[in-house]
Image (cartoon, rainbow, N blue to C red):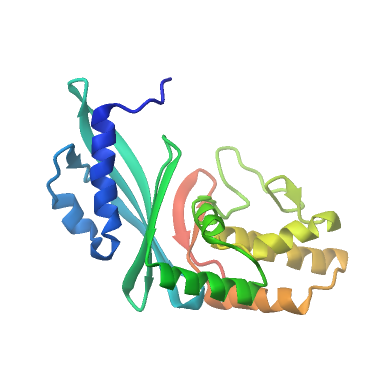
Amino acid sequence: MSFSQSKNEIEADFEMQTYFKNYSEFNLDSLKKKKFKAVKEIESLRTDFEFERVLDGGIKESIYNIVINFVDEHSFKDKEYKVHIFKKNNSIFGLINYDAHRKKKNQYFEEEKLDDYLQFHNIFYQTNFNTTDFVSQVLENLIYSYYCGYGATITKVPEYNNLKFNKKKNRKTFTNWLKSFNPELQTYGLDALLYLEKNKGIQVTELEKKLIANIKNRNSVLNTCSGCEMGIYEKVFE
């Protein structure tokens, strides 16, 4: 399979990136009606809002799937973007878009507000993350579930990413998950540390206790599944 981009695809992507750069004006309904030149159509049936969730520091993240059509070699081709919008006080201050087929990402932010968010996270979680870390963790596209996929079975000892929650040697990794920007990964870290505490007698640190309480109280909407049913967006804490 060739991954080279045609001139028409490059031009269509350029038009979309020009639109995304003006992130403060992002609106799905108006985007579907917007006229472009190289982009022949925003494919309405596959372009949609997925979900919104609360992050730390008063930030909200909204996730969209956007599919465009363009003409290439006398036929219509499509191009798909996963778009993450970030708001504070109902004002959009940034956007990340990702083309999974091309493995290409672009981000546009009001730098001062993004820096404030990174600083808040690094102080609260005792991390040293930068913009690159933030973008890569946001785009991990994880699913939080222990029972997912065709023929899925629930294991006696929970695990994620081939790391069993009853192994003390994994404790540092679990704590790192807890400190991620990604709410799904944070929740796996929370589960793993509490499992070790309950079943292996480890002592959860004061910092870990604080982070666990924050994640539970924040109760962000997560991307979950149940068996073969995918795309379930829900809060997991009471």
Residue 183 against residue 143 in the figure, above or below? below
Q: Nearer the viewer, residue 115 or 201?
A: 115
- Residue drawn at x 56%, y 78% as measured from the top left: 217
Number of numbered callouts drawn: 0
Can residue 5 be seen from the camera position used here? Answer: yes
Where is residue 202 shown, x and y percent of the image?
A: 85, 68
Percent coordinates x, y for residue 161 in the rendering: 68, 47
Which residue shows up at 66% across the image and 68% down it?
127
- Is residue 77 something one can see in this rendering? no
User: Residue 109: image x %, image y %?
Assistant: 38, 63
Q: Residue furthest front?
A: 112
- Say which quarter of the image contains residue 144: bottom right
**Horizontal arrangement in the rendering, residue 69 relative to residue 94 (left or right):** left
Front position in the image: 89 or 108: 108
| 150 versus 185 height, above or below | above
Q: Position of residue 164 (x, y in %)?
A: 77, 51
Q: Quadrant of the N terminus?
A: top left
Residue at point 67%, 72% (across, down): 126
Q: Is residue 174 left or right of residue 68?
A: right
Task: Point out the image quarter for the C terminus.
Answer: bottom right
Residue at point 45%, 68% (across, down): 114
226 versus 171 height, above or below:
above
Is residue 203 shown left or right of residue 222? right
